[in-house]
Amino acid sequence: MLDVVGHLLPFSLYEGLVFGFVAIGVYLTFRVLGFPDLTVDGSFALGGAVAAVLIVKDVNPFLATLAALGAGLCAGLATSLLNTKLRIPALLAGILVMVALYSINLRIMGGANVGLLREVTIFTLTSQFLGLETRIAYQLVVAGVLAIVVFFILNWFLRTEIGLAVRATGDNEQMVRGFGVNTDMTTILGVSISNGLVALGGAVVAQGQKFADVGMGIGMIVMGLAAVIIGEALFRPKGVARLLLAVLGGTFIYRLVISVALRLGMAPGDLKLITAVLVIIALAVPYLQKKVQREWLPPATRW
Amino acid sequence: MSENNSLLRLRKITKVFSKGTIDEVRALNKINLDVNAEDYIAIIGSNGAGKTTLLNIIAGVFPPENGGKIIVNNQEISGLSEYRRAHYVGRVYQDPHVGTAAKMSIEENMSMALLRGRPRGLRVASNKQRRELFRAALAPLGLGLENRLNTLVGTLSGGQRQALALVMTTLSKPALLLLDEHVATLDPRTAQIVLDLTEMLVEREKMTTIMVTHNMELALRHGNRLIMMHKGRIVVDMNQEQKADLAINDLVVAFERASGEEFVDDSVLLRPGNVVGISDL
């Protein structure tokens, strides 16, 4: 039993950190920008595909990971340009790019998946460099360092003058424009950064599991939402830094619950159904509470 | 159209909505207007007179029809989009929710406002010096907001938010201040506070101001110039001396003479002291 706990906790911590990049990306679009971006499923796989293909071509894995982040930025750029310059609704723009990315990812990989079994990844490099033998140890080091870097950069960026303008765009676009902010630009910036993070997550996950797969992004958006909702509900964060930590915490708890459920015999195939139900419950409860208390309720948004 | 010292010049401003349909509305009809520096103009008019459309045109929410010109400080800004005009034009809206961001703190809202029309960079948005500035700007309100910089704006009352919106809009001293029925949704006491604050700020900063209102009394008491609009045109334009001894009834007579119409149907406009106006387009 102890052994199980000793294995599950660090493993979930690792997963919480790497999938945390996805959750922070989802948080940036859905919560900060108010831009329901569904590109995520595609950009996650894009990150994995780009990193894997470059690594197979003997590119330095850190460079490959950085390239994956850049590819994600481009995917976000595409979605936000469709929305701001061609006025395609955010939801549809995201779906269009997500679908397009499926084909693009197949092209990049030249097939449905790329194996990384004997390749040099950021994990193998780190384990050699630090002399760490235990898999979970170097996994945690890599994920932890990346998460700390991302945390500090975002915590700083969201409090800069430009970062503030990005946040305010999601809060009150009309006001922000009145104060001289080009809200098209802030939207483009926010959505691009979000997808860059998601792709970074994809690149790290692919190297961790030693393969990239065209379907690896399926359900990422829902997982990200679940993590954000859990983080917000459990930690009720105030302020940028705590919000980011809460999202990471939410992802950790989500992965932990999933790991435990799998350990208890849940079929892996049921995972996405259960996640979806979880998100539905989390979204429905506040509404039903208000309904019971006979509070005024706005009509459903259709985005 | 010679060069003159007017801060804002409008030339042949026309705006047609739903062009080419049976709903076509000529909201503004060849408006010419010269606003001098430090003018404080009150614009009144019934619903659909074009008051808010005029403000929207000046602020750049939408462009005027071809041929219309908007000139600020001898620079034509007709082609600039809304966010590029922020440098010249600051606006307080009727709805306090429009002028402030609910999910951000007072400090963050003011940091946004401070950089109106200036390039935004990668410096952290608020620092000690700026916080002092914000406190000094909020203190005259007498609402205690200066001690609550970290409070989320969404938790403030409508009156507090509108007062904050006014301070935010004037913080960076735009060349032109547009007030769009900015006290219409406030209760009489709060409305008075915000109006006094407006008076004080306009006086102190010598800001050129255009205030749209439904309230004749307000229009008579505030400002040095009074403009009345009707069906997309300016029908009355009075200076300080002309409006000095005016009563509300005189305004009604002036309107009837200028527009050539009986002034009977417009109960909103006729009722003196009516602070809560009906929102118009």
Image (cartoon, coloured by chain):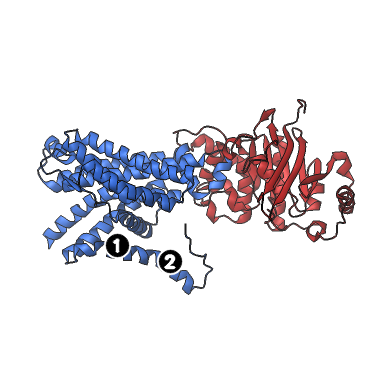
Q: What residue appears at the point 45 percent right and 46 percent down from the top-left corner?
A: A83
Dot 1: what SS? Answer: helix
Q: Position of residue B263 (x, y in %)?
A: 86, 56
What is the chain letter for disc 1? A
Mark closer to the chain start, 1 or 2 = 1
Q: Nearer the viewer, mark 1 or mark 2?
A: 1
Question: In front here: A181 or B3?
Answer: B3
Q: Taking A246 as reference, is A298 left or right?
A: right
Number of the label disc, if any, that sits on residue A275: 1
Q: Position of residue A80 (x, y in %)?
A: 43, 44
Q: CA distance from mark 1 to mark 2?
A: 18 Å
Residue at the farthest top position = B3
Q: Is residue B123 above or below residue A217?
A: above
Q: Taking A49 as reference, is B140 left or right?
A: right
The type of residue carrying mark 1 is: Thr
Q: Which residue corresponds to mark 2? A: A286
- Res. B252 visible in picture: yes
Q: Colour of chain A?
A: blue
Question: In front here: B203 or A263?
Answer: A263
What is the chain letter for disc 2? A
| Count of number-bearing discs | 2
Q: Colour of chain B?
A: red
Q: What residue appears at the point 40 percent right and 67 percent down from the top-left corner?
A: A284
Q: Is residue A104 above or below residue B95?
A: above
